[in-house]
Amino acid sequence: MKRNRVVFLAVVLVVIILISGVGIFWFFIWPNIENTHTATVDFWLEPKVYVKNATDNWGTEVDASHSILNATFSPFSCKNDGDLNATFDIIVVFSGVSVVPPDTQSTYQQINSTAAKFTFTLEKNQEKTANVPFTITSNDTFSISLSLQSSQSTLRIRIQPQNFGVRQLYFGFMLDKGGNQVFSPTTQSS
């Protein structure tokens, strides 16, 4: 009887040690193994973009630089913080504006009149910025949103963009102090 009890306690102790070992591996070691073999991608729109109409010519001012570029575009960026290379597409969708059809030197494909696709391959710790040209078709508001698509199984998408970036911008129409027409970001969402 005493011997059966000792055998039973030994078996229980071995089971407890095995379960503890599996638990430690599952919660502490496995996540680190997975994280070292992924590409972690972040992508965002520049939140301080203003579209101004100066002398009947729409242009873009980025980050209140007071220098207006003679084109309407929205800059966005993407970064791979992971340990593997990442291949993915960023889809830019507009409402109230139209995508400018690409020329032979463009880095994007036009999906339809309000959407464009940019294809990226980023090495680890690499960041890229691109501009999406558009034509204003609305007189009061427009919006821009980003999404990411990839068939790469080792790619993870950062849930919240870093660097104060956003993935969707809404622009409202107003007049600036000089009486110029301006589309200014009114709402941002990440």
Image (cartoon, rainbow, N blue to C red):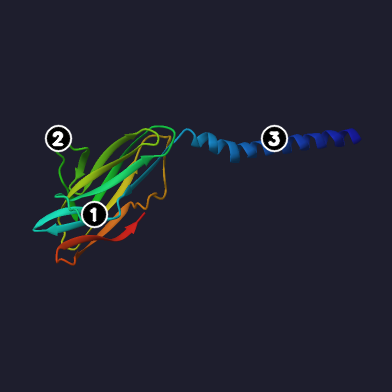
Q: Residue at x 32, y 58 (%)?
A: 188
Q: Nearer the viewer, residue 30 or 84?
A: 84
The residue under label 1 is which amino acid type? Ser
Nearer the observer: mark 1 or 3; the answer is: 1
Furthest toward the right, the residue is 1
Task: Find out whether the residues at labels 1 and 2 contact each other: C-beta distance under 8 Å.
Answer: no
> Which quadrant: the C terminus?
bottom left
Q: Secondary structure at mark 1?
A: loop
Instruction: From the top left corner, tell me how far across and down residue 44 is, in percent.
Output: 33, 48
Q: Residues within 10 Å of mark 1 (few under 14, many from 20)?
A: few
- Which residue is under mark 1? 65
Q: CA distance from mark 2 to mark 3?
A: 62 Å
Instruction: From the top left corner, tell me how far across and down residue 129 is, in percent.
Output: 28, 42
Relative vertical location of residue 80 with respect to residue 175 in this rendering, above or below: above
Horizontal side of 58 relative to 126 (left or right) equals left
- Which residue is under mark 2? 104
Instruction: From the top left corner, tell me how far across and down residue 142 is, in percent.
Output: 22, 58
- Which residue is under mark 3? 18
Q: Residue at x 89, y 33 (%)?
A: 3
Instruction: From the top left corner, tell me how far across and down residue 34 is, in percent.
Output: 51, 35
The residue under label 3 is which amino acid type? Leu
Q: Nearer the viewer, residue 14 or 57?
A: 57
Q: Earlier in the sequence, mark 2 or mark 3?
A: 3
Q: Secondary structure at mark 2?
A: loop
Q: Residues within 10 Å of mark 3 (few under 14, many from 20)?
A: few
Q: Secondary structure at mark 3?
A: helix
Q: CA distance from mark 1 to mark 2?
A: 30 Å
Q: Earlier in the sequence, mark 1 or mark 3?
A: 3
